[in-house]
Image (cartoon, grey):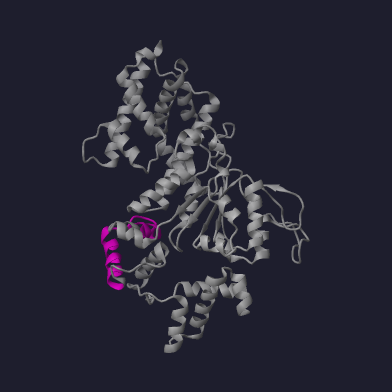
Amino acid sequence: MTVAKITDQEWTFLETVARAAFANPFGDTRDDLDILIGGASPGSSPDEILTSVLTRVATQVESLRARGVAELRAVEGNRREVLRRFFLFHVFHRYVDHFDRLIQAQLQAGDKPCRVGFAGDALGEMARFGLSEDEAERTFAVFYQLRRAFYFIRNGLVGSSPSMKALRRHLWDCVFTHDIRWFEAGLWNRMEEFSILLLGETGTGKGAAAAAIGRSGFIPYDRAANGFPESFTQNFVAINLSQYSEGVLESELFGHKKGAFTGAVENHEGLFSRCAPHGVIFLDEIGDVSVPVQIKLLQVLQERVFYPVGSHEARRFSGRIVAATNRPLDDMMLGGRFREDLYYRLCSDVVTIPPLRERLGEDPEELDNLIAAILSRVAGQQVPARERQLVKKVIRRDVGVDYDWPGNVRELEQAVKRIILTGRYQVVRREKGLGRADRIAAGMREGSLGAEELLAAYCGLLYDTCGTYEEVARRTRLDRRTVKKYVQMGDHA
């Protein structure tokens, strides 16, 4: 048989590469496999390790071709699967740079899908290895998805601390599952069944984590159009649920029919209607919505249908839900302010974003990495080490090494910007050990609170107790937007 021409030693090598083909790139297993495959010397850089891997794999491919055994149709069972993954590892890495350029081009083009000029070559290579046309096209789409996920998880969630490394591994699993065999067997087209709940303090990066998941969904390849029918930029849509009153929020989410209420002068397509077939909707501040809206969201998750305001016509939603909150949902469920059935529909997986103080405590270099990333984003290019060290020196001077960064990465970003503008970063110190009510009482005794500070503190205290802006507005007899402003002012005081 043809398989006899492949030696046992070669099969061992092929099996190792096959294991690496779809391994989590943010996990230790993939790193270990790369060293084993490439045989790089100790102390080699990641680029040197990858180069040695690709060189050895390419050499093995050419050897198999020369002997006429680079053909999947001649192999069956597990050995066919090993050989298939080996070939796909080779093809994928041959076109990595092309996929990266496609991602950059699509970011520039926005919602208009880009043509994929290299698709024909990649599909042709897979066909020569014995993949069917349908299998090759689906695999090409998965290749694009793999590269997008790597790009957005790596670039959107910077950090070298153990907790950030674990977060990146976790997010990869949210996109592809922990075992790619589940994904390849059919879940590639059914990941909308898996809602994700992101938890974490304000400013930790829940939006970046959601965007990494949302921009990494499967998009089928369309051979006739020589491209992907949807742009990943269009496939991720986000809404901050705390920005809207209940009535307006329902219209924003589900749309409304003309004449449904005063001011509804025309039909309005809500977020769920506008979501692309393979899209992701990010519901930020899910802990701030009222129970009636929670019930409607539950219906979408359970039945995959929703009704625009004023309409009895069911609309279907086929996208994926990612939700986030910094609120204590356990306490809210006990108090009846958040429905348990909605919680359990949202949490196919729960991802906790680590606070900045935890990251800095784990790895002293975390601050350097974040400063470098923030400066590069602000400047639009890499900033020299001297400028990065100057920013770090000012931070250490003005806040010290034990500052707990209550605003997390968002606060650090504003600190860097303020240092660029003013050369300093001054913070208002909170009194440790005092709750909000105690701080209000202490401020009143001392006569140190201005009217706005007092109102902000009181609104924040009520919000901690009631859980919604609407209830705080009712008790204070202020409008909702004013309440939200004061609550957020108190949170950052």
Q: In the image, is residue 315 above or below residue 466?
A: above
Q: In the image, is residue 46 above or below residue 473?
A: above
For the N terminus, the quadrant is top left
Can residue 118 be seen from the camera position used here?
no
Q: Which of 412 and 108 is in front in this view?
A: 412
Q: In the image, is residue 242 above or below residue 156?
A: below
Q: Which of 489 and 273 is in front in this view?
A: 489
Q: Nearer the viewer, residue 441 or 285?
A: 441
Query: In the orientation shown, which residue stands out farthest toward the front?
Result: 334
Q: What residue lies at 51% left-to-right and 78% top-to-bottom? A: 456
Range drawn in magenta? 372-398
Query: In the orientation shown, which residue stands out farthest toward the top?
Result: 1
Residue 374 part of the magenta-drawn span = yes
Q: In the image, is residue 105 above or below residue 208?
A: above
For the C terminus, the quadrant is bottom left
Can residue 312 be seen from the camera position used here?
yes
What x and y, as percent, mark residue 448?
A: 43, 87
Q: What residue lies at 30% left-to-right and 60% top-to-bottom? A: 361
Left or right relative to 476: residue 6:
left
Locate residue 429: give its quadrant.
Answer: bottom left
What x and y, as percent, mark residue 269?
A: 68, 54
What x and y, as percent, mark residue 476?
A: 60, 79
Q: What residue lies at 43% left-to-right and 22% top-to-bottom? A: 78
What x and y, as percent, mark residue 23?
A: 39, 37
Residue 457 part of the magenta-drawn span = no
Q: Name the chief secondary structure element in magenta.
A: helix
Left or right relative to 387: residue 327:
right
